[in-house]
Each structure stands twice: as C-alpha cells, then as structure tokens.
Amino acid sequence: MKAAPIKYIGTDDLSIDLFEGQYQVPNGMSYNSYVILDEKVAVMDTVDAHFTHEWLDNIATVLNGAKPDYLI
C-alpha cells in the first residue's frame, strides 16, 4: 500500500512575538496546514484570518482546480 501524498499549505507569521499570548517566539511562527491527496482530498487545519488570501492561494496551487472533500 502506497502512502498518500501530503502537501504543506501553511503560512508563516513573522510579525508575531508571542505564541498564545504567553510564549516568546522571536522568529515568528508557522500556521501548519496540509492537504492529503488520496481517494478523497482532505485539508488539515487552517491559518490565522490575516493569512487567508495566502492560504487559499496555497490550496489552489496544490489542488490545481480540484475541490477538497473534507476540511478537518
């Protein structure tokens, strides 16, 4: 059985200095989001609303016109 391809579609937030308002992150942080490409297509997690446009562009690039079956 072959593993389904998993593609990173997250974004980086280099302007944030505190994670969850309490942990210092001097180099910013990443919003990890992935697409699993299998018989069904699943998008795993989203990003902060400030990065919606970039995230949707990343999804469009990976899916190349296909529609996801699930958003988890």
Image (spheres, rainbow, N blue to C red):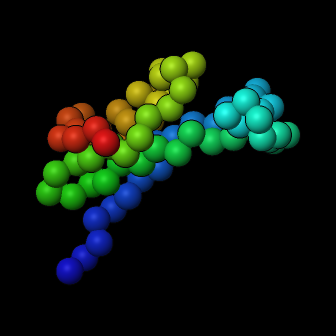
x, y percent for residue 54: 51, 27
Tell me which residue sits at (71%, 36%) in the image. 19
Q: Position of residue 37 (x, y in %)?
A: 27, 54
The residue located at (67%, 34%) in the rendering is 20
Residue drawn at (52%, 41%) of the image: 10
Residue 65 relative to residue 57: left or right: left
When the figure is inspected, residue 45 is found, relative to residue 7, above or below; the finding is: above
Residue 6, position as x, y percentages in the image: 38, 58
x then y, percent, for residue 23: 78, 41
The answer to whether 46 is drawn above or below residue 52 in the figure is below
Q: Nearer the viewer, residue 18 or 9?
A: 18
The N terminus: image quadrant:
bottom left
Instruction: Say which of 3 and 66 sits in front.
Output: 3
Q: Residue furthest front?
A: 22
Question: Is residue 66 visible in the rendered structure shown here?
Answer: no
Asked if residue 36 lies left or right of residue 34, the reply is left
In the visual, does 39 lie left or right of 8?
left
Answer left or right for 50 relative to 66.
Answer: right
**Does 60 sit above or below residue 44?**
above
Count every numbered label the image shows and give the total.
0
Q: Is residue 33 visible in this depiction of the protein?
A: yes
Q: Quadrant of residue 61?
A: top left
Query: Residue 45 lies in what quarter of the image?
Result: top left
Q: Residue at x 51, y 20 (%)?
A: 49
| Snapshot quadrant of residue 71 | top left
